[in-house]
Image (tube, grey):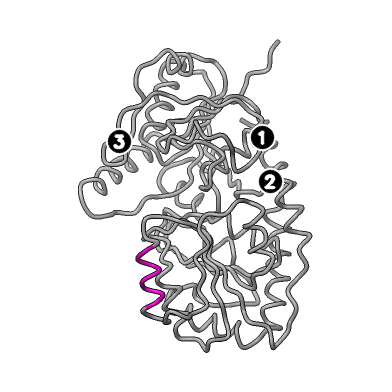
Protein backbone atom coordinates (compact mmCIF):
# COMPACT_ATOMS: atom_id res chain seq x y z
CA UNK A 1 0.00 0.00 0.00
CA UNK A 2 1.34 3.45 -0.95
CA UNK A 3 2.26 5.64 2.03
CA UNK A 4 0.22 8.90 2.02
CA UNK A 5 2.20 12.02 1.16
CA UNK A 6 2.35 15.14 3.28
CA UNK A 7 1.10 18.12 1.30
CA UNK A 8 1.72 21.68 2.46
CA UNK A 9 -0.03 24.94 1.65
CA UNK A 10 1.14 28.44 2.49
CA UNK A 11 0.76 31.96 1.20
CA UNK A 12 4.42 32.47 0.29
CA UNK A 13 6.70 30.69 -2.16
CA UNK A 14 9.33 28.58 -0.36
CA UNK A 15 12.16 28.72 0.49
CA UNK A 16 12.23 32.54 0.26
CA UNK A 17 13.78 34.71 2.96
CA UNK A 18 11.00 34.77 5.59
CA UNK A 19 10.41 32.48 8.53
CA UNK A 20 7.22 30.84 7.23
CA UNK A 21 8.84 29.98 3.89
CA UNK A 22 11.94 28.57 5.58
CA UNK A 23 9.90 26.38 7.95
CA UNK A 24 7.82 24.99 5.08
CA UNK A 25 11.02 24.38 3.12
CA UNK A 26 12.64 22.40 5.94
CA UNK A 27 9.49 20.33 6.48
CA UNK A 28 9.36 19.54 2.77
CA UNK A 29 13.02 18.52 2.83
CA UNK A 30 12.04 15.78 5.32
CA UNK A 31 8.47 14.94 4.30
CA UNK A 32 8.83 15.31 0.55
CA UNK A 33 5.38 15.76 -0.94
CA UNK A 34 4.13 18.77 -2.84
CA UNK A 35 4.04 22.38 -1.60
CA UNK A 36 1.24 24.70 -2.76
CA UNK A 37 1.53 28.47 -2.57
CA UNK A 38 -0.47 31.56 -3.53
CA UNK A 39 2.89 33.16 -4.39
CA UNK A 40 1.81 36.81 -3.87
CA UNK A 41 5.36 38.04 -4.53
CA UNK A 42 5.45 36.20 -7.89
CA UNK A 43 8.65 34.34 -7.05
CA UNK A 44 7.83 31.19 -9.01
CA UNK A 45 9.46 32.59 -12.15
CA UNK A 46 12.81 33.23 -10.50
CA UNK A 47 15.67 31.13 -11.82
CA UNK A 48 17.48 30.72 -8.51
CA UNK A 49 16.35 29.85 -4.97
CA UNK A 50 17.99 30.91 -1.73
CA UNK A 51 18.28 27.22 -0.71
CA UNK A 52 18.38 24.00 -2.77
CA UNK A 53 14.85 22.73 -3.51
CA UNK A 54 14.26 18.98 -3.92
CA UNK A 55 10.44 18.88 -3.73
CA UNK A 56 7.72 19.86 -6.24
CA UNK A 57 5.99 23.23 -5.87
CA UNK A 58 2.80 24.53 -7.44
CA UNK A 59 1.08 27.92 -7.49
CA UNK A 60 -2.63 28.04 -6.69
CA UNK A 61 -4.57 30.63 -8.69
CA UNK A 62 -5.88 33.23 -6.26
CA UNK A 63 -7.70 36.53 -6.04
CA UNK A 64 -6.05 39.95 -6.24
CA UNK A 65 -5.05 41.20 -2.77
CA UNK A 66 -7.86 42.71 -0.71
CA UNK A 67 -6.28 44.55 2.24
CA UNK A 68 -3.29 42.19 1.76
CA UNK A 69 -5.64 39.17 1.94
CA UNK A 70 -5.70 36.65 -0.92
CA UNK A 71 -8.13 33.79 -1.41
CA UNK A 72 -7.81 30.85 -3.83
CA UNK A 73 -9.78 30.87 -7.09
CA UNK A 74 -11.70 27.75 -8.17
CA UNK A 75 -9.38 25.65 -10.33
CA UNK A 76 -8.63 22.04 -11.19
CA UNK A 77 -5.48 22.26 -9.06
CA UNK A 78 -7.53 23.45 -6.07
CA UNK A 79 -10.09 20.65 -6.49
CA UNK A 80 -7.30 18.06 -6.63
CA UNK A 81 -5.78 19.44 -3.43
CA UNK A 82 -9.11 19.51 -1.56
CA UNK A 83 -10.20 16.01 -2.57
CA UNK A 84 -6.86 14.31 -1.96
CA UNK A 85 -6.68 11.85 0.91
CA UNK A 86 -3.08 12.79 1.73
CA UNK A 87 -2.05 14.56 4.93
CA UNK A 88 -2.50 18.33 4.52
CA UNK A 89 -0.44 20.76 6.61
CA UNK A 90 -1.15 24.50 6.33
CA UNK A 91 0.82 27.50 7.51
CA UNK A 92 -0.92 30.39 9.30
CA UNK A 93 -1.47 33.33 9.45
CA UNK A 94 -3.33 33.43 6.13
CA UNK A 95 -7.11 33.65 5.67
CA UNK A 96 -6.81 31.81 2.36
CA UNK A 97 -4.88 28.93 3.90
CA UNK A 98 -7.34 28.71 6.80
CA UNK A 99 -10.21 28.49 4.33
CA UNK A 100 -8.47 25.65 2.47
CA UNK A 101 -7.79 23.67 5.64
CA UNK A 102 -11.38 23.93 6.87
CA UNK A 103 -12.77 23.05 3.43
CA UNK A 104 -10.48 20.00 3.17
CA UNK A 105 -11.63 18.77 6.59
CA UNK A 106 -15.33 19.32 5.80
CA UNK A 107 -15.08 17.51 2.45
CA UNK A 108 -13.16 14.55 3.91
CA UNK A 109 -13.72 14.43 7.70
CA UNK A 110 -11.35 11.48 8.18
CA UNK A 111 -8.51 13.20 6.36
CA UNK A 112 -5.54 14.21 8.51
CA UNK A 113 -5.41 18.03 8.42
CA UNK A 114 -2.89 19.86 10.61
CA UNK A 115 -1.76 23.43 10.98
CA UNK A 116 1.42 25.39 11.73
CA UNK A 117 0.65 28.43 13.93
CA UNK A 118 3.58 30.76 13.26
CA UNK A 119 2.45 33.95 14.98
CA UNK A 120 -0.33 35.94 16.56
CA UNK A 121 -1.34 39.19 14.89
CA UNK A 122 -1.61 42.51 16.69
CA UNK A 123 -4.15 45.21 15.96
CA UNK A 124 -3.02 47.78 13.43
CA UNK A 125 -4.83 50.96 12.34
CA UNK A 126 -7.46 51.00 9.63
CA UNK A 127 -9.78 48.57 7.90
CA UNK A 128 -7.11 45.94 7.18
CA UNK A 129 -6.16 45.80 10.87
CA UNK A 130 -9.77 45.09 11.89
CA UNK A 131 -10.10 42.56 9.08
CA UNK A 132 -7.06 40.58 10.16
CA UNK A 133 -8.10 40.56 13.80
CA UNK A 134 -11.47 39.15 12.68
CA UNK A 135 -9.56 36.48 10.76
CA UNK A 136 -7.50 35.64 13.87
CA UNK A 137 -10.64 35.29 15.98
CA UNK A 138 -12.04 32.89 13.39
CA UNK A 139 -8.74 30.97 13.17
CA UNK A 140 -8.68 30.43 16.93
CA UNK A 141 -12.20 28.96 16.69
CA UNK A 142 -11.30 26.64 13.79
CA UNK A 143 -7.81 25.43 14.69
CA UNK A 144 -8.92 23.31 17.71
CA UNK A 145 -11.17 21.34 15.32
CA UNK A 146 -8.21 20.15 13.22
CA UNK A 147 -6.06 17.11 13.92
CA UNK A 148 -2.95 18.78 15.32
CA UNK A 149 -1.17 22.08 15.77
CA UNK A 150 2.54 22.83 15.56
CA UNK A 151 3.87 26.09 16.96
CA UNK A 152 7.35 27.43 17.48
CA UNK A 153 7.79 28.16 21.19
CA UNK A 154 6.33 27.40 24.63
CA UNK A 155 5.05 30.99 24.72
CA UNK A 156 2.82 30.46 21.69
CA UNK A 157 1.84 26.97 22.84
CA UNK A 158 0.61 28.24 26.20
CA UNK A 159 -1.41 30.97 24.49
CA UNK A 160 -3.01 28.52 22.04
CA UNK A 161 -4.04 26.26 24.92
CA UNK A 162 -5.44 29.28 26.74
CA UNK A 163 -7.46 30.08 23.62
CA UNK A 164 -9.06 26.63 23.53
CA UNK A 165 -6.66 24.20 21.85
CA UNK A 166 -6.24 20.89 23.66
CA UNK A 167 -2.71 20.68 25.02
CA UNK A 168 -2.19 17.11 23.78
CA UNK A 169 -2.80 18.33 20.21
CA UNK A 170 -0.30 21.21 20.39
CA UNK A 171 3.35 20.41 19.64
CA UNK A 172 6.23 22.83 20.15
CA UNK A 173 8.65 22.53 17.24
CA UNK A 174 11.11 25.44 17.23
CA UNK A 175 12.38 26.65 13.88
CA UNK A 176 15.59 25.06 12.63
CA UNK A 177 18.56 25.55 10.34
CA UNK A 178 19.44 23.32 7.44
CA UNK A 179 22.17 20.76 8.02
CA UNK A 180 24.54 22.71 5.79
CA UNK A 181 23.84 25.99 7.58
CA UNK A 182 24.28 24.39 10.98
CA UNK A 183 27.61 22.77 10.07
CA UNK A 184 29.05 26.03 8.69
CA UNK A 185 27.87 28.14 11.63
CA UNK A 186 29.07 25.72 14.30
CA UNK A 187 32.49 25.72 12.62
CA UNK A 188 32.89 29.47 13.23
CA UNK A 189 35.27 30.01 16.19
CA UNK A 190 34.17 32.12 19.18
CA UNK A 191 35.14 35.80 19.04
CA UNK A 192 38.36 36.83 20.78
CA UNK A 193 38.07 38.84 24.01
CA UNK A 194 40.23 41.64 22.62
CA UNK A 195 39.80 45.06 24.32
CA UNK A 196 41.10 46.79 21.18
CA UNK A 197 38.49 45.12 18.95
CA UNK A 198 35.70 47.31 17.59
CA UNK A 199 32.36 45.76 18.54
CA UNK A 200 30.52 44.68 15.39
CA UNK A 201 26.73 44.83 15.75
CA UNK A 202 24.64 42.97 13.19
CA UNK A 203 21.04 43.48 12.09
CA UNK A 204 19.40 41.05 9.65
CA UNK A 205 15.85 41.57 8.48
CA UNK A 206 13.43 43.28 6.17
CA UNK A 207 13.62 47.05 6.48
CA UNK A 208 9.99 47.53 7.48
CA UNK A 209 8.50 49.61 10.28
CA UNK A 210 7.86 46.80 12.79
CA UNK A 211 11.50 45.64 12.64
CA UNK A 212 12.33 48.87 14.58
CA UNK A 213 15.82 49.44 13.26
CA UNK A 214 15.24 53.00 14.48
CA UNK A 215 15.33 51.76 18.09
CA UNK A 216 18.71 50.13 17.46
CA UNK A 217 20.09 53.29 15.84
CA UNK A 218 18.88 55.41 18.77
CA UNK A 219 20.47 53.00 21.26
CA UNK A 220 23.80 53.02 19.43
CA UNK A 221 23.75 56.83 19.37
CA UNK A 222 24.12 56.73 23.18
CA UNK A 223 27.34 54.64 23.03
CA UNK A 224 30.94 55.75 22.62
CA UNK A 225 31.98 55.39 18.96
CA UNK A 226 33.81 52.06 19.35
CA UNK A 227 31.29 50.04 17.39
CA UNK A 228 30.10 49.50 13.84
CA UNK A 229 26.72 48.35 12.56
CA UNK A 230 26.16 46.06 9.58
CA UNK A 231 22.57 46.06 8.26
CA UNK A 232 21.62 43.10 6.07
CA UNK A 233 18.28 43.34 4.30
CA UNK A 234 16.13 45.64 2.22
CA UNK A 235 12.60 46.93 2.28
CA UNK A 236 10.23 49.88 1.97
CA UNK A 237 11.73 51.85 4.88
CA UNK A 238 15.36 51.69 3.81
CA UNK A 239 15.61 55.34 2.75
CA UNK A 240 13.93 56.49 5.96
CA UNK A 241 16.35 54.43 8.07
CA UNK A 242 19.34 55.74 6.10
CA UNK A 243 18.15 59.32 6.70
CA UNK A 244 17.64 58.63 10.41
CA UNK A 245 21.13 57.14 10.69
CA UNK A 246 22.69 60.24 9.16
CA UNK A 247 20.67 62.64 11.31
CA UNK A 248 21.47 60.75 14.54
CA UNK A 249 25.07 59.77 13.90
CA UNK A 250 26.34 61.97 11.09
CA UNK A 251 27.43 61.10 7.54
CA UNK A 252 30.67 59.42 8.68
CA UNK A 253 29.05 57.01 11.12
CA UNK A 254 30.10 53.34 10.94
CA UNK A 255 26.65 52.22 9.76
CA UNK A 256 26.61 50.10 6.60
CA UNK A 257 23.42 49.29 4.66
CA UNK A 258 24.41 46.15 2.74
CA UNK A 259 21.07 45.30 1.15
CA UNK A 260 19.83 41.76 0.62
CA UNK A 261 22.73 39.28 0.55
CA UNK A 262 23.04 35.71 -0.62
CA UNK A 263 23.60 32.99 1.96
CA UNK A 264 27.40 32.94 1.55
CA UNK A 265 27.72 36.71 2.01
CA UNK A 266 25.36 36.65 4.98
CA UNK A 267 27.48 33.93 6.57
CA UNK A 268 30.55 36.17 6.23
CA UNK A 269 28.76 38.95 8.09
CA UNK A 270 27.72 36.58 10.88
CA UNK A 271 31.26 35.23 11.19
CA UNK A 272 32.58 38.77 11.70
CA UNK A 273 29.89 39.95 14.15
CA UNK A 274 29.99 40.20 17.96
CA UNK A 275 26.28 40.60 18.69
CA UNK A 276 23.03 40.35 16.76
CA UNK A 277 20.08 42.60 17.56
CA UNK A 278 16.49 41.76 16.56
CA UNK A 279 14.57 44.83 17.79
CA UNK A 280 11.09 43.97 16.46
CA UNK A 281 8.14 45.38 18.37
CA UNK A 282 5.21 43.16 17.32
CA UNK A 283 4.13 39.58 17.87
CA UNK A 284 4.22 39.15 14.07
CA UNK A 285 7.91 38.47 14.80
CA UNK A 286 7.31 35.31 16.80
CA UNK A 287 10.68 33.57 16.64
CA UNK A 288 13.47 35.06 14.52
CA UNK A 289 15.43 32.35 12.69
CA UNK A 290 18.34 34.79 12.39
CA UNK A 291 18.76 34.36 16.15
CA UNK A 292 19.50 30.68 15.61
CA UNK A 293 22.13 31.56 13.02
CA UNK A 294 23.80 33.92 15.48
CA UNK A 295 23.63 31.53 18.43
CA UNK A 296 25.04 28.61 16.43
CA UNK A 297 27.90 30.90 15.42
CA UNK A 298 28.60 31.70 19.08
CA UNK A 299 27.09 35.20 18.99
CA UNK A 300 24.66 36.47 21.65
CA UNK A 301 21.36 37.70 20.22
CA UNK A 302 19.26 40.48 21.75
CA UNK A 303 15.49 40.55 21.26
CA UNK A 304 12.56 42.02 23.15
CA UNK A 305 10.01 40.10 25.15
CA UNK A 306 6.58 40.63 23.66
CA UNK A 307 3.17 39.26 24.61
CA UNK A 308 2.29 36.34 22.32
CA UNK A 309 5.79 36.20 20.84
CA UNK A 310 8.60 33.75 21.50
CA UNK A 311 11.44 35.88 20.11
CA UNK A 312 12.57 36.90 23.60
CA UNK A 313 12.45 33.27 24.79
CA UNK A 314 14.66 32.07 21.93
CA UNK A 315 17.72 34.08 22.95
CA UNK A 316 17.41 34.21 26.76
CA UNK A 317 20.77 33.70 28.49
CA UNK A 318 21.36 33.17 32.20
CA UNK A 319 24.53 35.22 31.95
CA UNK A 320 22.57 38.27 30.75
CA UNK A 321 19.63 38.87 33.11
CA UNK A 322 17.83 41.87 31.60
CA UNK A 323 14.16 42.72 31.19
CA UNK A 324 14.29 42.50 27.38
CA UNK A 325 12.59 45.89 27.15
CA UNK A 326 13.49 48.46 24.47
CA UNK A 327 14.46 51.08 27.04
CA UNK A 328 17.28 48.82 28.29
CA UNK A 329 18.84 48.13 24.88
CA UNK A 330 21.41 50.93 25.12
CA UNK A 331 22.42 49.77 28.63
CA UNK A 332 22.98 46.18 27.48
CA UNK A 333 24.93 47.29 24.39
CA UNK A 334 27.11 49.50 26.60
CA UNK A 335 27.85 46.53 28.85
CA UNK A 336 28.88 44.41 25.86
CA UNK A 337 30.94 47.23 24.39
CA UNK A 338 32.91 47.75 27.61
CA UNK A 339 33.42 44.08 28.44
CA UNK A 340 34.78 41.93 25.56
CA UNK A 341 35.20 38.96 27.91
CA UNK A 342 31.49 39.17 28.73
CA UNK A 343 30.68 39.17 25.02
CA UNK A 344 32.76 36.04 24.54
CA UNK A 345 31.25 34.17 27.50
CA UNK A 346 27.72 35.06 26.38
CA UNK A 347 28.55 33.86 22.88
CA UNK A 348 29.68 30.51 24.27
CA UNK A 349 26.48 30.27 26.34
CA UNK A 350 24.41 31.12 23.26
CA UNK A 351 26.00 28.25 21.34
CA UNK A 352 25.33 25.84 24.23
CA UNK A 353 21.69 26.95 24.29
CA UNK A 354 21.46 26.40 20.56
CA UNK A 355 22.85 22.87 20.84
CA UNK A 356 20.55 22.05 23.77
CA UNK A 357 17.27 23.37 22.34
CA UNK A 358 17.53 24.10 18.64
CA UNK A 359 20.05 21.73 17.03
CA UNK A 360 18.77 20.13 13.86
CA UNK A 361 18.91 16.60 15.28
CA UNK A 362 16.57 17.63 18.11
CA UNK A 363 14.23 19.14 15.52
CA UNK A 364 14.26 15.95 13.45
CA UNK A 365 13.58 13.77 16.49
CA UNK A 366 10.65 15.94 17.63
CA UNK A 367 9.19 16.07 14.12
CA UNK A 368 9.41 12.28 13.77
CA UNK A 369 7.66 11.67 17.10
CA UNK A 370 4.90 14.15 16.22
CA UNK A 371 4.44 12.63 12.75
CA UNK A 372 4.11 9.11 14.19
CA UNK A 373 1.64 10.23 16.85
CA UNK A 374 -0.54 12.15 14.40
Q: Which residue is mark 2?
A: 178
Q: Quadrant of residue 355?
A: bottom right
Q: Secondary structure at mark 3?
A: loop
Q: Which mark is residue 262?
A: none
Q: Dot 1: few (<14), some (14–19), or many (≥20) neighbours within 10 Å?
A: some
Q: Which is nearer the N-term, disc 1 or disc 2?
A: 1
> Residue 269 vs residue 146: left or right?
right
| Residue 136 or residue 159, whichever sits in front | 136
User: Would you say residue 149 sits in the magenta stretch?
Assistant: no
Q: Residue furthest top?
A: 1
| Residue 238 or residue 101, whichever sits in front | 238
Q: Position of residue 42 (x, y in %)?
A: 43, 34
Q: Which residue is mark 3?
A: 65
Q: In whole angstroms, how far apart are the C-alphas of marks 3 and 1?
A: 30 Å
Q: Is residue 124 above or below residue 215?
A: above
Q: Residue furthest left?
A: 127
User: Would you say residue 242 sits in the magenta stretch?
Assistant: yes
- The quarter in which the C terminus is drawn is top right
Q: Which mark is residue 29?
A: 1
Task: Say if mark 3 contacts mark 1, CB within 8 Å.
Answer: no
Q: Secondary structure at mark 1?
A: helix
Q: Dot 3: few (<14), some (14–19), or many (≥20) neighbours within 10 Å?
A: few
Q: Which is nearer the N-term, disc 3 or disc 2?
A: 3
Query: In the image, which residues are magenta?
Result: 239-246
Q: In whole angstroms, how far apart are the C-alphas of marks 3 and 2?
A: 32 Å
Amino acid sequence: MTQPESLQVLREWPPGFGGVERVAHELASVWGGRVYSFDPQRQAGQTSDSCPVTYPRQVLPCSPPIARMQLPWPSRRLVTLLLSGDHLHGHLPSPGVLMLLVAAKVLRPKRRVTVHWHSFLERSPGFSGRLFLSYQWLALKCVPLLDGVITTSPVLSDELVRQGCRSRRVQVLPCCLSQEQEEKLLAIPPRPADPARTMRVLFIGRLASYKRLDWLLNALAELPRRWELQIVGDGPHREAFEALSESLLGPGAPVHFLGQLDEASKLQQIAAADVLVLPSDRSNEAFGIVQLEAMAASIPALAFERRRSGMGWVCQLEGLPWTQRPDELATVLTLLLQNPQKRRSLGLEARRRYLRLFARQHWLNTLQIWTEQN
